[in-house]
Amino acid sequence: DIVMTQSPDSLAVSLGERATINCKSSQSVLYTSNNKNYLAWFQQKPGQPPKLLIYWASSRESGVPDRFSGSGSGTDFTLTISSLQAEDVALYYCQQYYTTPYNFGQGTKLEIK
Amino acid sequence: EVQLVESGGGLVKPGGSLRLSCAASRFIFNNYTMNWVRQAPGKGLEWVASISGGSDFIYHADPVKGRFTISRDNGKNSLYLQMDSLRAEDTGVYYCVRDVGDLAEYFQHWGQGTLVTVSS
């Protein structure tokens, strides 16, 4: 199984500042035949289902603000929020869809400092 | 807009059974791989099972293998999860999730979830 490990577990950032969340997979999720990283990021607010933010490690889902960006390849990935807004307070999860089981990271709680 | 509405959750005793349903609308159901993902109270997300558009490919997570069965009825635009031999650790919100397509790729749309509580 591919184990997904996020860091940090929680993060407090001031409004307008940059927030960075890391995700590491226990093996590569880069499919060499198409050069795509099978890695997604989700945002979950209290009482709501998760919402897709980023897929293929760096492609932003339609309607997601451009302050959200994803980067990385192979086993190391990053979700960056360039200028934190109050509505970004949430839990964030990475997930690999390279192979079953489609494991998620443990989650990172993002708060306002 | 894609709609996914789960139902069938509730309180059940350990060892009991439940059948979850997900009614899908506003997209061509049989063109998409569908999934169940669960979340225990206060915990993270856990993939449970996936089924391709034509039911050719079916996968279950190890913790539920042999106890849960994912299925679909494309004529009724519905996804199901038959849950047998339920345990306390199966307690949580179960989400119906649609892939972006039928190639087992990323999870694009999520339902609101249905709560399953396994307790005596």
Image: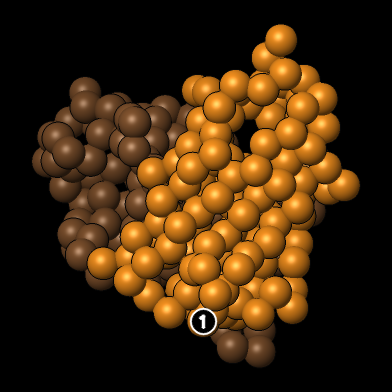
Q: Which of A35 and B63 is in front in this view?
A: B63
State the image coordinates of residue A18 (x, y, percent, origin top left): 23, 44
Image x and y of residue B14, in percent: 77, 20
Residue B95 drawn above or below residue B87: below
Viewer can see residue A79: no
Q: Residue furthest front?
A: B76
- Using residue B30 as the reference point, say whether residue A82 is left or right of it: left
> Is any part of residue A53 visible from this angle?
yes
What is the display colour for chain A? brown
Say whether residue B78 is left or right of residue B54. left
Q: Nearer the viewer, residue B116 or A39?
A: B116
Q: Is residue B21 above or below residue B3?
A: above
Q: Which amino acid does label 1 sit on?
A: Asn
The C terminus of chain A: image quadrant: top left
Q: In which quarter of the image is residue A84?
A: top left
For this view, does B90 lie left or right of residue B79?
right
Which chain hosts label 1? B
- Give the colour of chain B: orange
Q: Which residue lies furthest to the right in this view?
A: B66
Reading the image, the residue beneath label 1 is: B31
Relative height, residue A105 to residue B49 (above, below): above
